[in-house]
Image (tube, grey):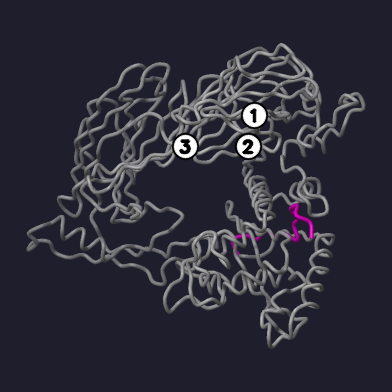
Amino acid sequence: MPSSCSIRALWILNSLHAVVLSRKFPVVEKQWRAACKTINDTSKDAEEDPLKYTVFPFLPNDAELSSAFVERKKREGSLRGYGIRVNNQSVEGSDSWVDDPITRHIISINVESKEKGGENHLLWPLILHLRGSYVILVLPLVEPVHLKAYAKLCRKSDCGNAVGVDASLSSILLDTPSITGAFMVAHAIGDIIVGDVVDPDVVVNAAPSVGGLLDSLTGSIGIAGISSRAKPVAAPVASATPSGAASIGTVTADTPKLGSRPLDKDTLRNFISSAMPFGTPLDLNYSNIFAIKANGFSSSDLPPADLKQPAWKPYLFKGKQRIFFTIHETIHAALYDREEISDTISVSGQINCRAELEGLPDVSLPLSGLNKAHVEVLSFHPCAQVSEHGADKQAVMFSPPLGNFVLVRYQANCGFGPPIKGFYQLSMVSEDEGAFLFKLHLMEGYKAPLTMEFCTVTMPFPRRRVVSFDGTPSVGAVLTTEHSIEWKIIPIGRSLSGKSIEATFPGTVRFAPWQIQRFPPSNSGFGKMGDEDSDVEIESTSNMANVEEFLMEKISKDLPPVDLEEPFCWQAYRYAKVSFKIAGASLSRMSIDPKSVSIYPAVKAPVEYSSQVTSGDYILWNTLGKCPSAAVAQV
């Protein structure tokens, strides 16, 4: 069987678990059936090999698939839907019996075949991707021996095998690289469904229009989103930024936004047919597929005779030549302010690129700061060729695609201290009133050109309604919503650069009276997390000597079901989330020297470089309350 990625079939289900769109690829199915016939002919008798018939050579129809998926939700409910084995609940032969978190994303279903007299057959590996109100299932082509190996795992008495151990799920996945391609297909389809098909941001300086081939192609049909140049438009800010925020500079985006609308089946069918003909993914870039379908190819747009035009560059750029690089990092942190729990801070970053270069040139550059950044994970775009790296540098050469693309992705440590550090304390003095205190240090040890463009601290109270609050911060302003208090330390439009500040905010918050509440079961991708609703009863506190102890005991007893998609929504946990944006340099110390960028064949093209850092899950846990933390392995 071929080692490249091939897709047997894919299904899209709505919120009612009805199949609204499906696509099967007969060419790939023919390969699967041939492989099944080979392995079944060479297998032992059914009595000696009870797993022989788990290799099912046919695909279920839409009704069978939908019914099997619903049955799986019932079988894998609660924590079992996340690959965690639960005593007296997990069923042998189910994904939770494997007891591996990856079964949250790579699932199996048992399909009842009417052709075989109601016999059940295992369908695996199904890539599960949730986007909006839709469920996307993608079935890649793997060898039947891998399916049989997984079927054996579902019947083993033990669980939790270590990585690399024989007959473990990790070892099976390492032998099936097509699963990675199936994930890419699922994510591309999900982006199209919800209209989130915008290319990576490349922040550049405002400049006049420089023209280009795609401008002439797309301008005539009114598609301004596809462009071969930088346009002076406001830059969208990352998800950590409050709405209405804008970034200094401009951004280029090549892809048309589909917007929020019902499932566009024609658009999906056209994308699937063009992006993965005969079931083999070739180009999952929606802007490329859209431009090719809308404009075709021009006979005058031909590459040099001695060069082969790559699939990721369907059009050749014409116009003023230049290159843009943007390092975009997201910083995650959990700050506890406790001696027994260490703070954690990490950086995930990517280098976005836009190379407006004529012809098919090669671009090379050294990435510096690898040792300083303590890079743990480093991956590159398929267009890149990477040589052996030195002590602190990584040489990269690539043939750039058209438009914006992610050249490098990485995970690293923060080269500086936390940009915001301090503590948050919240103590409930009664059932309906709490006293809180913030003491924070912003940008301590940070120097120019690092600039904090905004900073907001939010105290969420998802299970209580805020009635009022009392308190005045030392800096900034405060806003309240029905379920949160927002402290805007640095509002948008102002910035902090070259110095650090200390910000304090003491106060009290009042909630609506605590009444009997009925929490609906929390739904996740696999069904409800609790079988019964949680009722919160009112009890008298008149004879309680320690109100805080009483409240915590009560809250712990009557915890509403938790949704693992929102891991911080437990009522017993109190936390504050910090949102900010920093410009001027990367916090991992990863950097690009524009003077070291070279182009072959040589051409005079200015190189522009920028960087920005946004907050991800930057959490201040309540020092006086409960908090989750990862256990440190004892060596």
Q: Is residue 595 above or below residue 142?
A: above
Placement of the N terminus among the 4 image quadrants: bottom right
Drawn side of residue 603 relative to residue 459, left or right? right
The quadrant holding residue 397 is top right
Drawn side of residue 76 relative to residue 23, left or right? left
- The answer to whether marks 1 and 2 mark residues whose Cβ atoms lie closer than 8 Å is yes
Badge 3 crowding class, 10 Å Cα cut-off, few under 14, some 14 to 19, many 20 or more, is many
Select label 1 or label 2 by which is in front.
Answer: 1
In magenta, the rendered stretch is 1-16
Badge 1 crowding class, 10 Å Cα cut-off, few under 14, some 14 to 19, many 20 or more, is many
Drawn side of residue 606 relative to residue 553, left or right? right
Residue extending furthest right? 299
- Residue assigned mark 3: 412
Label at residue 396: 1
Distance between mark 3 and mark 2 Cα atoms: 15 Å
Q: Residue at x 82, y 38 (%)?
A: 293
- The answer to whether marks 1 and 3 mark residues whose Cβ atoms lie closer than 8 Å is no
The quadrant holding residue 487 is top left
Who comes first in sequence, dot 1 or dot 2? 2
The three-letter code of the residue at mark 1 reads Val
Out of 388 and 13, give the one closest to the viewer. 388
Q: Is residue 534 above or below residue 268?
A: below
Distance between mark 1 and mark 2 Cα atoms: 9 Å
- Residue assigned mark 2: 380
Decide whether residue 6 is among the magenta residues. Answer: yes
x, y percent for residue 624: 20, 48
- SS at circle 3: strand
